[in-house]
Amino acid sequence: MKIAVLGGSFNPIHIGHLALADEVCSALGYDRVLFIPTYQPPHKEARDIVSAEDRLQMVRLACEGDGRFQAESCEIDRGGVSYTWDTVCFLEQKYAGQLEDRIGLIMGDDLLPGFHLWKNAEALARKCRLILARRPMTIESASHANRPHGAYAQADFASNLDYDFADDPLFEGAVRLSNAVLPLSSTDIRTRAGEGGGFKYLVPAAVFQYIMERRLYTHGNN
C-alpha cells in the first residue's frame, strides 16, 4: 500500500484539501492519504482555534465516502507540539509490513524555504517521498514559510514564492505536483461562519452541517 500524509490545523478542513488529496492519489498512484490534524496549531490561530476533538471530527466527516482518505489522530493523541519526523516514524511502525514505498509527505511550496529548520530535515527528506504542491498566495499564509517546528503544510494555502527548490539538495528526488490551485482559506471560512456569510459549498456537506449545528467559529464558541 502506498500512503501519503497531509497534515494541518484543519480549522476547518475544506474542499481544497480534498482536491489536493485526490490529485495525489490520481496522479501519483497513492492508495491512501492520511489527514493528520495538529494538536497545537501555529500561534497565529490561537485566537480562533476550535477544539482538537472538533477538528478531528470534521476531518473524519470529510473523509467519509472515499476509501482513499482517512483521518489519523496520532498527533492529537500525542498532545503538545508534534514534529513531522516523530509522526512519520510512528506511521512507519503502525503500517509495518504494509508499505510498498516510502511514505509520501505532502508539502505546500510555501514551506520549502524553511524546510531546513524542521526536525531532522535531511533524514526526513531521505525517509519520505516529498510531494510538493502548488498553493495560491494569501497574505496570511506567507507567515508559514519559515515556521521551524516542522508542522505539515496548512490548509491556508500560499504559493509561487520566489524560491528555487530545484537547486536545494534537500529536495533531490522530490515530486512536483501539478495540482489545481483553489483560492480557499480556512481563515476566510472561519470569518464567513462568524459573520453569517456563505461558505456552504467551500466545505464538505457533512462538515458544513457540523459547523452549523455546533455553532463553531461564532462569537463565544471558538
Image: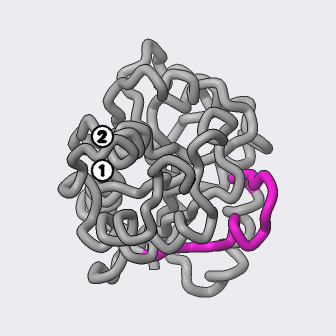
Q: Residue at x 74, y 51 (%)?
A: 83
What amino acid is labelled 2 in the image? Leu
What amino acid is labelled 1 in the image? Gly
Whether residue 75 appears in magenta in the rendering, the answer is yes
Q: In terms of depth relative to the viewer, which is nearer, 48 or 141? A: 48
Mark number, residue 184:
2
- Pick out the residue farthest to the front: 220
C-alpha gap between disc 2 and disc 1: 6 Å
Q: Residue at x 34, y 81 (%)?
A: 64
- Circle 1 packing at 10 Å, graded few (<14), some (14-19), many (20+), is many
The magenta segment is 70-85
Q: Residue at x 55, y 29 (%)?
A: 112
Q: Which numbered disc, 2 or 1, marks the residue that appears first in the sequence?
A: 1
Q: Is residue 71 above or below residue 178?
A: below
Pinpoint residue 157: horizontal percent, then vertical percent.
Answer: 40, 36
Pinpoint residue 213: horizontal percent, then vertical percent.
Answer: 38, 71
Q: Secondary structure at mark 2?
A: loop
Asked if residue 183 can be seen in this view, the reply is yes
- Pick out the residue farthest to the top: 162
Pinpoint residue 18: horizontal percent, then vertical percent.
Answer: 31, 60
Whether residue 147 appears in magenta in the rendering, the answer is no
Asked if residue 175 can be seen in this view, the reply is no
Instruction: Please give left or right for residue 40 compared with residue 49 in the image.
Output: right
Q: Residue at x 24, y 50 (%)?
A: 199
Q: Is residue 144 above or below residue 121?
A: above
Q: Is residue 48 above or below residue 57?
A: above
- Circle 2 packing at 10 Å, graded few (<14), some (14-19), many (20+), is many
Q: Are marks 2 and 1 in contact (CB under 8 Å)?
A: yes
Mark number, residue 16:
1
Res 147 quadrant in image: top right
Pinpoint residue 154: horizontal percent, then vertical percent.
Answer: 50, 44
